[in-house]
Image (cartoon, grey):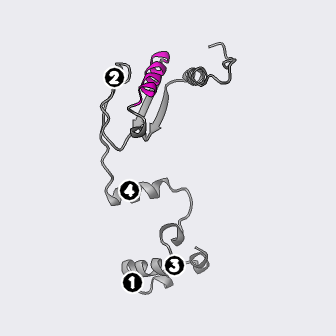
Amino acid sequence: IDGKAPAVSGDGYSTLLWSLRRLECRGRVLLVLDGIEDWVDSMAVRTLLADVLNATERLCILLGSRIHVQNSFGGLKTDNLELKPLQPKDAAQLFLYRVHRHLYWKDLWRSKEEWMKKAAEWYGDNVYNKVADRSLLDTG
């Protein structure tokens, strides 16, 4: 790669290839395309993906779909893996692990009353007394 972007700015394919090759200089590249069920049957898109894969060395493409897709892309290897939904407890644990801020009642419930009712079911009627900083509960 000569380090220069394609001269023609309207040529999206050349720009895409140039960008991917630049990224490949740093190592493997993962391109994630989700919702492919809307365009997976398009011959133009399948040809484009096959061309991009053939023109790069370290590119991996992850295709996400809600339906099973059996297409191959230009005779290149594809693996179909079904990801089943998480169990509710596992989904909650993943959510809590990925949240990087404090959670408030308004993040999870429509109203403070709805939260208080649920919290009373879980922790007893005196749950409001267990809240350390009631001003945070009120502003939630």
| Residue 44 inside the magenta-drawn segment | yes
Residue carrying label 3:
112
Q: What segment is highlighted magenta in the picture?
A: 42-56
Q: Nearer the viewer, residue 30 or 120?
A: 30
* 128 up-or-down from 92: above or below: below
Residue 126 position, x and y percent, is 44, 86
Residue carrying label 2:
77
Tell me if mark 4 has few (under 14), some (14-19) or many (20+) residues whose alpha carbon lies within 10 angstroms of its own: few
* 113 up-or-down from 81: above or below: below
Q: Which of labels 3 and 2 is toward the front?
A: 2
Q: Considering only order in the chain, which callout, 3 or 1, is on the residue closer to the N terminus?
A: 3
SS category of the residue bearing label 4 = helix
Single out the residue that lies furthest toward the bottom. Answer: 125
Tell me if mark 3 has few (under 14), some (14-19) or many (20+) residues whose alpha carbon lies within 10 angstroms of its own: some
* 63 up-or-down from 74: above or below: below
Q: In terms of image quadrants, where is residue 79?
A: top left
Q: Amino acid at mark 3?
A: Lys
Q: Are marks 3 and 2 in contact (CB under 8 Å)?
A: no
